[in-house]
Image (cartoon, rainbow, N blue to C red):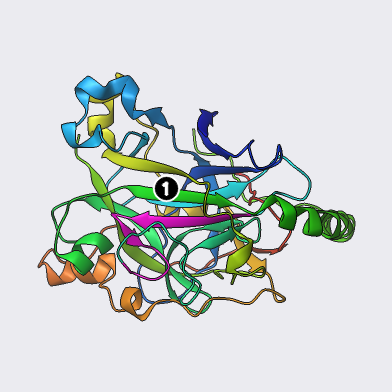
């Protein structure tokens, strides 16, 4: 079952366990400079608003109807990150497959529903607290950046030579009930100990006062994609919930919903001037996936911009990340002040 509340997607599996809930939301953030230098994690500025496709069926492309799901607005060249959370101590483990334009964001392979262990094509929640982009190397991602479909920027277009799907596709499998019973007590003790030792840091930051989009690979960011610590056989692949997250241009968003889109995101210069913190995520005991060579060979947004004869990418000046705040693996979100 999938529900929305406060712009959060809640994937729940009451038939498995009352705690089997995986919450997913999409955070507005700084588009980091695309200059082939790895940057720390920027703050989340606010959640993107989510709307049900069925509520606006008459104003949306007919091709969206079979997909259902939700949609959110993004400005051209705006970045997002995906946040995973749970309300329960212990956070019921779930395996989450994520694709952008039906291209797996960890491997670059075409979409298929089954979980694959080698190479691992899913993230494990709550071990994976957030995901900011395409996995291109061990401890490195390229940021998710929105660009119009049909112009060749998205990973989907670069890998499949078509602009058919756009958006994000999310599929969640819960851990088997009997396996959860074995790990629940140990995890509760571990979380309680870590909170007592390190506190609970967060990543959120207060934000400053029609055309479908795809996600292009943007600047390099330091971020681990955590390897599955449990193994493939613990996930109940007989039960799943999936959601198509469409992305519309912010200008078209007003025509569809009658609402004004969110404020434009800050540039790197504005972010630095406001002294919003960057974040270094410490997770030394977690094994990281090696990343995908297929995705690593894609043109980044700035490279594609140049190859298309459009000059340099606007608002792409390098910046010196400061201050950088270290956060522990127990952190759920990141926090700063604007």
Kindly indicate the quadrant of the structure image that contains residue 60: top left
Q: Which residue is mark 1?
A: 266
Q: Residue at 63% across / 45% down in the picture?
A: 337
Q: Quick check: 224 left or right of 181?
A: left
Q: Where residue 88 sits: x, y (%)?
A: 74, 42
Q: Is residue 80 above or below residue 281?
A: above
Q: Is residue 318 visible?
A: no
Q: Residue at 63% across / 67% down in the picture?
A: 280
Q: Is residue 174 above or below residue 115?
A: above
Q: Does dot 1 land on a helix, a strand or a loop?
A: loop
Toward the viewer: 54 or 283?
Answer: 54
Q: Residues within 10 Å of mark 1 (few under 14, many from 20)?
A: some
Q: Residue at 35% across / 30% down in the picture?
A: 261
The verdict on residue 95 being magenta is: yes
The verdict on residue 2 being magenta is: no
Q: Where residue 326 sits: x, y (%)?
A: 69, 65
Q: Where residue 191 sits: x, y (%)?
A: 82, 56
Q: Where residue 54 sits: x, y (%)?
A: 32, 24
Q: Is residue 5 visible?
A: yes
Q: Quick check: 95 left or right of 326?
A: left
Residue numbers of the magenta segment: 94-109
Q: Is residue 12 above or below residue 198?
A: above
Location of the C terminus by quadrant is top right
């Amino acid at each position: 079952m999938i529900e929305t509340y406060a712009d959060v997607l809640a994937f729940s599996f009451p038939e498995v366990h009352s705690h089997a809930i995986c919450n997913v939301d999409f955070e507005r953030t700084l588009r980091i400079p695309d200059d082939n230098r790895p940057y720390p994690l920027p703050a989340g500025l606010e959640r993107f608003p989510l709307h049900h496709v069925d509520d606006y069926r008459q104003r949306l492309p007919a091709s969206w109807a079979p997909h259902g799901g939700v949609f959110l607005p993004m400005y051209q060249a705006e970045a997002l990150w995906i946040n995973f959370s749970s309300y329960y101590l212990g956070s019921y483990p779930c395996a989450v497959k994520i694709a952008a334009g039906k291209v797996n964001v960890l491997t670059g392979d075409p979409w298929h529903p089954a979980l694959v262990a080698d190479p691992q094509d899913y993230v494990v929640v709550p071990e994976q607290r957030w995901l900011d982009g395409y996995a291109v190397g061990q401890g490195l991602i390229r940021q998710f950046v929105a660009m119009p479909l049909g112009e060749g920027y998205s990973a989907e277009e670069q890998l499949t030579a078509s602009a058919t799907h756009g958006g994000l596709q999310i599929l969640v499998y819960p851990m088997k009930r009997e396996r959860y019973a074995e790990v629940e007590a140990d995890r509760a003790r571990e979380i309680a100990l870590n909170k007592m030792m390190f506190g609970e840091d967060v990543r959120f930051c207060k934000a400053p006062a029609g055309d479908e989009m795809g996600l292009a690979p943007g600047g390099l960011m330091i971020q681990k994609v955590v390897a599955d610590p449990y193994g493939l056989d613990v996930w109940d692949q007989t039960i799943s919930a999936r959601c198509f997250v469409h992305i519309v241009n912010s200008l078209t968003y007003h025509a569809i919903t009658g609402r004004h889109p969110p404020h434009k995101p800050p540039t790197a210069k504005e972010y630095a001037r406001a002294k919003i913190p960057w974040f270094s995520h410490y997770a030394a005991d977690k094994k990281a996936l090696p990343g995908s060579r297929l995705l690593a060979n894609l043109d980044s947004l700035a490279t594609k911009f140049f190859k298309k004869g459009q000059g340099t990418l606007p608002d792409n000046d390098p910046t010196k990340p400061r201050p950088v705040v270290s956060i522990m693996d127990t952190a759920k979100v990141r926090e700063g002040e604007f």
